Amino acid sequence: MNVDRRTKSAQRILIMTSVSAERDAILRGLHGNSTFDVRVGGVGLASAAASTATALATTSYSLVINMGIAGGFVGQAEIGSLVVANEIIAADLGSQTPDGFISIDELGFGSARVPVDTRMVAQVVEALQAAGFPTTTGPILTVSTTTGTAATAQELAARVPGAAAEGMEGYGVATAAHQHGIPVLEIRAISNPVGPRDRDAWRIKEALQMLESASSVLLEVLS
Ligand SMILES: O=C(O)c1cccc(C(=O)CC[C@H]2O[C@@H](n3cnc4c(=O)[nH]cnc43)[C@H](O)[C@@H]2O)c1
């Protein structure tokens, strides 16, 4: 007999964050709404993928969202703004060669890109903009090492034209959701520019406040 270990529940939405400060900001914005489960999955794509897969093994969800703070590519997403991914890309998953980087797509080992539901993205972007929040959409890159130099920022921007932001978990969360056949979104509040590392310049408090505000809008659009 096939035993389905998952709890049945219609329209549950799973939000995965990397750290507890992000989870707490989102929970404040959701005002205890029971449609959403908000979990901390750890930093980095491996931890995020494993934590997401564990959540999906025990509960049925209609949508998975990776939310958190992120670096914004200069000219694409400024500090204090929001980015909704139109594609979730593991930007450093591949091989370095003397002639440049080769992605796992080109190597024939699967894909470093997870698609998103473009209609849902448009709906969320429209709602966030209507609420007055500076919001853009574009590829959000997942990296294992945060970018710390102008040269790496330029290299990534050239590798993925239009890259808007970088985080460390999106591709892990998205891969787990994709393997379960569940749609996925990535929504990031920009705390710092992608480029030369200057931790003192990170505006974490402001980004967490933006995550909280964005969560209130999600409540209206998705629940
Ligand atoms: O120190 C704190 O109070 C604090 C509060 C909330 C979050 C943090 C983090 O450091 C979260 C790490 C998390 O942030 C993402 N992130 C942010 N900026 C970048 C970036 O420029 N490049 C890549 N990732 C970035 C990332 O997803 C980390 O998991 C601290």
Image (tube, rainbow, N blue to C red):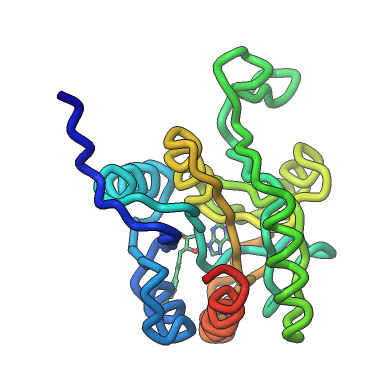
> Residue drawn 75% across and 42% down?
155
Answer left or right for 137 relative to 192.
right
How many dots with numbers?
A: 0
Q: x and y percent of residue 83 in the render? A: 69, 64
> Residue drawn 62% across and 55% down?
166
Answer left or right for 86 relative to 43.
right
Q: Quadrant of residue 198?
A: bottom right
- Above or below, 185 against 27 in this view is above
Q: Can residue 61 be seen in this view?
A: yes
Question: Along the line of sight, which residue is nearer the eye, 46 or 14?
Answer: 14
- Above or below, 158 against 69 in this view is above
Question: Along the line of sight, which residue is nearer the eye, 203 or 126?
Answer: 126
Question: Along the line of sight, which residue is nearer the eye, 30 or 86?
Answer: 30
- Above or below, 72 against 191 in this view is above
Q: Quadrant of residue 93?
A: top right
Q: x and y percent of residue 100 in the render? A: 73, 24
**Residue furthest toward the left?**
1
> Residue drawn 64% across and 71% down?
190
- Above or below, 35 against 108 in this view is below
